[in-house]
Image: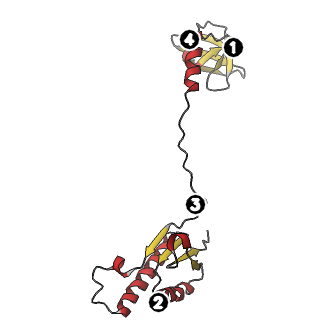
Amino acid sequence: MSVFKVGDIVETIDDVISGTILSIDGPKITMEDTNGFVISFLASEVMKVGEDIKVSNFEVAQIKSEKEIPKRRKIINTKPKERNAPKMEVDLHIHKLTRNSGNMTSYEKLNLQLETAKRQLEFAIRKRIQKVVFIHGVGEGVLKEELGYLFRRYDNLKHYEADYQKYGMGATEVYFFQNI
């Protein structure tokens, strides 16, 4: 840090303000900028214009050694398929929905699955989730067909087979058209 005196031309370090020192009061420097305004700064916030900055060889070597150390970057590579992955999955297998399905009729099981699907569909619409996958399994296709009827009641969505590699034949993906 250099020693300042009245009449020195200085610039601020963090701003684009330059001017002439009018008075010095300890660490406080009062200057008149090029527009004629009188402003006060701390001595640590200004530097003389045209002053050479002196750096020792040790300081240069220290900075060079810091620069040579490679910094590890955290690069998270997301695969294109993962970027388009659905935000929500709903597993409609009966053993995932209830503990004791043994004493339920097929009709009761199907109704429970459809009620769950409808509730999750409404939730996704409310929360503006754009993609949902309903995992229904392969079986005889009754649940899949009923889900198709359910999805056709909504105007703002389309449904299609979900990613085969991830879900096989037993899942349907729903895409919501968002009216933003």
Q: According to the image, label 4 marks what residue? A: 58
Where is residue 140 drawn, in percent x and y?
47, 89
Of residues 45 and 84, the one nearer the viewer is 84
Of the residues tagged 1 and 3, which is closer to the observer? 3
Residue 164 falls in image quadrant: bottom right
Residue drawn 35% across the image and 91% down it: 108
Choose the circle earlier in sequence order: 3 or 2: 3
Question: Going by the image, does 48 lie left or right of 72?
Answer: right
Residue type at numbered disc 1:
Val
Residue type at numbered disc 4:
Phe
Q: According to the image, label 3 marks what residue? A: 83
Residue type at numbered disc 2:
Glu
Cα distance between the residues tagged 3 and 4: 49 Å
Q: Is residue 5 above or below residue 93?
A: above
Residue drawn 51% across the image and 75% down it: 168
Choose the circle earlier in sequence order: 1 or 3: 1
Of residues 78 and 59, the one nearer the viewer is 78
Numbered disc 4: secondary structure: helix
Of the residues tagged 3 and 2, which is closer to the observer? 2
Q: According to the image, label 1 marks what residue? A: 49
Choose the circle earlier in sequence order: 4 or 2: 4
Where is residue 121 drawn, in percent x and y?
48, 77
Numbered disc 1: secondary structure: loop
Residue 111 in sight from this viewpoint: yes
Q: Is residue 39 above or below residue 113?
A: above
Cα distance between the residues tagged 1 and 2: 84 Å
Residue drawn 68% across the image and 17% down it: 19
Choose the circle earlier in sequence order: 1 or 2: 1
Residue type at numbered disc 3:
Arg
